[in-house]
Image: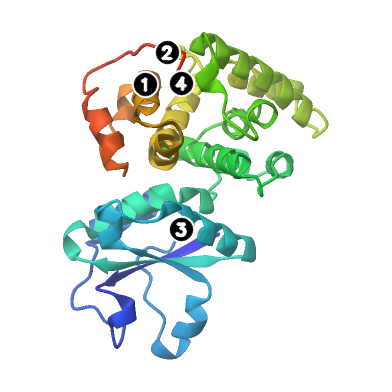
Amino acid sequence: MLKRLILVAGSCSSSDDPSVRQTPLLSPSDKAELSREFPGVEIDAPAPPRGELYAAQAAHAAIDARAWRASALDLWALDTHLHALDARGPFDLWIDGLERDGAARTAYEVLTRCQRFIRRRNLASASAAFARVLGRHRDLYDLDRPLVRADYDHAVDVWQWMLRLEPRASAAAQAAALFHDVERLVSEANVRIEHRAADYQAFKDEHARRGAALTRSALADLGLAPEVLERIGALVGSHERPGDDAELALLNDADALSFFSLNSGGFLDYYGPEHTRAKVAYTLRRLRPEARARLPRVRCRPEVEAMLLGEPRRTSAPAPAETQA
C-alpha cells in the first residue's frame, strides 16, 4: 500500500544529500489539497537520512518528473514494480527531478494514476461485510494473466475514483464499481473481442447483463442484505448506459475517468488510433459535466489528449462502429 509521497528537487541519485531542499516544492495550500484528495498518504514526506537511504530504497518506487511530463515514462515497468512493492507491504513513492513550478500538478497526476495502491475506504466500506466483498473480488482474478491484471487494476481504480467523486458513496455503489466488468473474466480474459461486435452497444448491454448475473452469484453467500445484493446487480446490469439514477451516473463517471487516467495509453497501444478515437468519443458521452471538468488534471498520452481536444463541446457521441472497442 502506498503510504508516503517524497518529492525531490533534482535527481536524488546525483545529490549528496537528497533530503536537502532550498525551498519547499509545495505551497501549504497545494499540500492541503493533495492530502484531501488522497487521504492516507503522507504528502511531501521528508526523504530518509543518508544512513537510512539504502534500506528505504528497497521499499520505494521512483518516477522521474521530466520523463513523466514528456510522456516518456515506461508505465508498464512502473506498474510491474508497484505491484511487486504492494504485495510486500507499505511502500514510498518518490518523484525526482522536480521544480517548484509544476510540482503540485505532477504530484496530483502521479497520485491519480497510482491511486489504486491507496485503497481508501469510507464508513460504508470499512465494514467486515465489505471486506468479504473485497476478498471475493480479488479471488476471482488470476493476476498472472496480463488482461486479467489490467481488468483488476481498472476495477480497483474505478472504486477509488468513485470515492473521490462521492466520499459518501454507498457500499452497494462501491461493490458495483469493483464488479462492473467481471463478465470480462469469461469473455475477454485472453484476448479482447469487443472490436468484432456487429452492434457495439448491444455487445456492451449484453456484457452488463451477464456481469450482473455473475456478480449476484459471486456475492450470494457473503451475507449481504437481499436489497443490497439486488442493488449491486442492478447497477452492474445498467452501467453501460447513462441514466437518471444518481449512483449509476456516479459509476459511469468513475468508469470513464479511470479509462482516461489509467487505461487509455494501453488501449491506444492495443487497438491503435482509429479504435481509440471512437472509444474516447464513446467514453466522453458517459461523463457528466462536473466529472468531465476533471479531465484537464488527468495525465494522458499526447495522442489521447489530442483526441480529447477534438471533442471539446460534445455532450453525446455515437457508439463506436463495429471495428471499435
> What amino acid type is highlighted by mark number 3?
Leu
Q: Are marks 2 and 1 in contact (CB under 8 Å)?
A: yes
In the displayed structure, 253 sits above or below 285; it is below
Q: Which residue is mark 3?
A: 78
Instruction: For label 1, count other residues whose C-alpha is less than 10 Å away and answer few (under 14), some (14-19) or many (20+).
Output: many
Q: Are marks 4 and 3 in contact (CB under 8 Å)?
A: no
The Cα atoms of the two marked residues, 4 and 3, are separated by 31 Å
Work out whether mark 2 precedes mark 3 in sequence or the reverse, and give the earlier one. 3
The quadrant holding residue 227 is top right
> What amino acid type is highlighted by mark number 2?
Ala
Work out whether mark 2 precedes mark 4 in sequence or the reverse, and give the earlier one. 4
> What amino acid type is highlighted by mark number 1?
Ala
Q: Which residue is mark 4?
A: 249
Position in image of residue 32 (x %, y %) = 31, 56
Nearer mark to the viewer, of 4 and 3:
3
The Cα atoms of the two marked residues, 2 and 4, are separated by 24 Å
Q: Are marks 2 and 3 in contact (CB under 8 Å)?
A: no
Q: Which residue is mark 2?
A: 321
Q: Residue furthest right?
A: 221
Work out whether mark 3 precedes mark 1 in sequence or the reverse, and give the earlier one. 3
- On the rendered structure, is 308 left or right of 279? left
Q: Which residue is mark 1?
A: 278
In the displayed structure, 179 sits above or below 137; it is above
Instruction: For label 3, count other residues whose C-alpha is less than 10 Å away and answer few (under 14), some (14-19) or many (20+).
Output: some
